[in-house]
Amino acid sequence: MQIVNRLTAAGHQVVTVKAGGAFQQVDSTNFILKPGESHHYELLTAELQANNWIPDHVIHAWSLTGTNSNPLQNGSFEHVQDLGFYSLLFFVRALAKQNFGKDLKLFTLSDHIQEVHGNETLIPKKSTLLGPCMVIPQEYPNIRIKSIDLEVPSCGKADDLGIDEIVGEFFSADSELFVAYRNNQVKAGIGRPYTVAEERTVGHLDYESQSG
C-alpha cells in the first residue's frame, strides 16, 4: 500500500496486519488475522506488547475497498461489519486488556461513507464504522480518533499529492473527528452519519500500526 511505503521511507517503524482466515505472525512486523475473531486481536496486541511494538499511531484501512469491485456487492453485511465496526472495537478492547494507557492516535480510512459533492456511491452498511469513532474516545480518553473518508480514483491509486495530504493527517494537531477528501481537497467537520437499517485491508488492504 502506498501509505505504508511512504511512512517506511520517512523512517517510521510500521507493523502491518492483513485480513485472512486464521491468525498468523508472518514475521516480526507482519501479521494476518481473521477480522471477526476477537481473540485474534488479543493475540496480536499481546505479541506487540511482548516485543515493545505498542504503537502511538494506528491506521485502520480495512474499510477502504476502492473501485475495483462493484460497491453494491462489497460483501455481506456481516463481512463488512467484521472489517469495519467489529475490527475497530475488538482492537481497542484488546489494547485495554493489555492495560494500554499511553496516548494513541487512531485513524480510520474508508470510502463510500460520506456524502460531500452528491455524486458519491454510498454504501450504508459501511457507515456503522463511524459509531465506534464517536464512542471510543469517550470510553478511552487516551485514544484520539479521526475518520478519513476518501474517494479513490478510477485507476485505484491516489496520486502523490493525495498521499502526501493523507499522510499529513496522521501528524496533524487538529481535532476534527470526521474529514473527507474529494479531488485532493479536504472537507472537515462533516455531519454525523445516517442510520443504517439493513442487514454484520479485503485483499491487500492493511491495518497499519505505526510507531516512532
Image (spheres, rainbow, N blue to C red):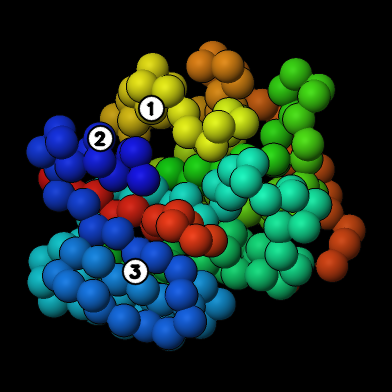
Circle 1 residue? 163
Q: Secondary structure at mark 2?
A: helix
Residue 188: x percent and y percent? 57, 21
**Disc 2 to disc 3: CB gap under 8 Å:** no
In the image as oriented, which residue stretches furthest toward the right? 197
Question: In the image, which disc is placed on residue 95?
Answer: 3
Residue 204 appears left or right of 116: left
Crowding at mark 3 (Cα within 10 Å: few <14, some 14-19, many 20+)? some
Q: Residue at x 53, y 61 (%)?
A: 202
**Disc 2 to disc 1: CB gap under 8 Å:** yes
**1 vs 3, front mark:** 1
Crowding at mark 2 (Cα within 10 Å: few <14, some 14-19, many 20+)? some
Residue 18: x percent and y percent? 39, 65
Quadrant occupied by the C terminus: top left
Q: Nearer the viewer, residue 156 or 112?
A: 156
Q: Residue at x 21, y 52 (%)?
A: 14
Residue 200 visible in the picture: yes
Residue 105: x percent and y percent? 35, 44
Residue 212 drawn above or below residue 98: above
Q: Secondary structure at mark 3?
A: helix
Classify residue 22 by image quadrant. Answer: bottom left
Residue 88: x percent and y percent? 50, 61
Tell me how far mark 2 sits from mark 1, CA to CA: 8 Å
